[in-house]
Amino acid sequence: MLHGSGIFALHLTDTQILTLGSPAVSILFSFGFVLVWNYGRRRAQYLLLISASFFVYALAAISQILYIPRDSGLNALFSGGLFLFSLLLLSSGVTKRYRAHFDGVLHGLAVIATLLALAYFYYEQPDVVVRIYVLNFSVAGMVLLSAFRIRTISRGALIDRTFFWVYLLFGISFIVRTSLSVTKAVSNGASAFLASPFWLALQMSLLLFAILLAMVLLAAAMLDIISVLQHDRNIDDLTKLHNRRSFEERSLRKLVAHRNESICLVLCDLDHFKVINDSFGHHAGDMVLMECGNIIRRCIRKNDIAGRFGGEEFVVLMPNTSLAGAARLADRIRAELADANFPAMTGVHPVTASFGVAELLPNESLSDLFRRTDTMLYAAKKEGRNRVMLDGAGTVSGHIEEDANDVVPLST
């Protein structure tokens, strides 16, 4: 691979049989990427690009090893073109995986220029050594360019850092291997080429890097899938807030981590929600729930936990927050919801909600805190709705003051 010499062979030699292991492994990995893509609900489209890359590389290797087509010049261009295309697909898939810019035009021009150079140094000025350098250095450039585009992952998660360095070494290997192993012996015919250090080093390193890159990419893809499945399991699809199970799990951890700080709980229940569903349909009700979720996510801080606890009931746990601070958050949500516009419910009174707020007592459990906060919510309903009721502090309503803490979207 990567020499463009067009070695003629009438039958399979031991070397050819041995080197066919590399494309065989690549084809297996290609199907493996498709299986992972399908298992991941066909969301990760970059896996198809990487699968295609491994498959095209296998075709390039088979073309060269089995000498298809038989014409030496066509074989050099055909196998070289396939390999360049496989690298283009790999670079595209890798940059897509890491949401980086893919230099498609630059890669395309590199492929065209390389093929023209291969044709020139075969038909006009035959030189197999130059063709080796042209093809290998072009491939190195394509890989290193995409590695540069994803360089930020070198400071990311362990699996991403591992992939970056393997991918970077993969690109550098084409320069180092070619510079150290190419000798004039590669020009002395097919037998000499197949016995050359360059050919043997090439096949061994390509097989090694194919396995390493595929294994790391497959591991990264599986971690992506697990993350997505966990997100789907934990996040309410309509409001994009934590569901009840996820909220309780995270809240219990927060209580342990912030046991020496003031922690408050806010319960929110939409007023007359059944009337909304009955009068305007469930679609209108869903729009109200979605907007309430949006408002909550806009208002809370990064360290807060927000969830949808029931049909129209929402909850926010606020570590390192006083009762007054939690009341300000609740009243801000209440005011923004009352000001929200719902086109499907034109001409009706504002959508309102009632809130209960309580602060965690020393040695109190999460369930006990819930019971006290729910009592405040029930009191807010009893007092006439569209208000915030604080445990032991009465009712709060009207224009809110900004909390001292930054307001950022919910981190899920």
Image: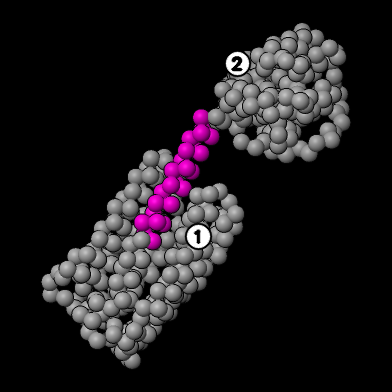
The residue at the far left in this view is 11
The residue at the far bottom in this view is 125
Per the rendered image, the range of residues in magenta is: 209-233
> Residue 133 falls in which quadrant of the image?
bottom left
Q: Position of residue 140 (x, y in %)?
A: 45, 71
Inspect the magenta stretch and tell me whether residue 366 lies in it. no
| Residue pointed to by mark 1 | 165
Q: Give above or below for 291 relative to 169.
A: above
Q: Is residue 332 visible?
A: yes
Residue 278, numbered label: 2
Q: Position of residue 352 (x, y in %)?
A: 74, 21
> Residue 241 falls in which quadrant of the image?
top right
User: What distance separates the C-alpha of mark 1 from that of mark 2?
Assistant: 59 Å
Decide which of 183, 164 is in the foreground and name it.
183
The amino acid at mark 2 is Asp
Neighbour tally class for label 1: few under 14, some 14-19, many 20 plus, Cα within 10 Å: some
Q: Please tell me which residue is depicted at 52% across the width and 63% down the height of the picture.
A: 147
Residue 51, numbered label: none
Disc 2 secondary structure class: helix
Inspect the magenta stretch and tell me whether residue 230 lies in it. yes
Please identify the quadrant where the C terminus is shown: top right
Tell me which label, 1 or 2, sits earlier in the chain: 1
Q: Please tell me which residue is depicted at 36% across the width and 61% down the height of the picture.
A: 208
The amino acid at mark 1 is Trp
> Residue 365 falls in which quadrant of the image?
top right
Please identify the quadrant where the N terminus is shown: bottom left
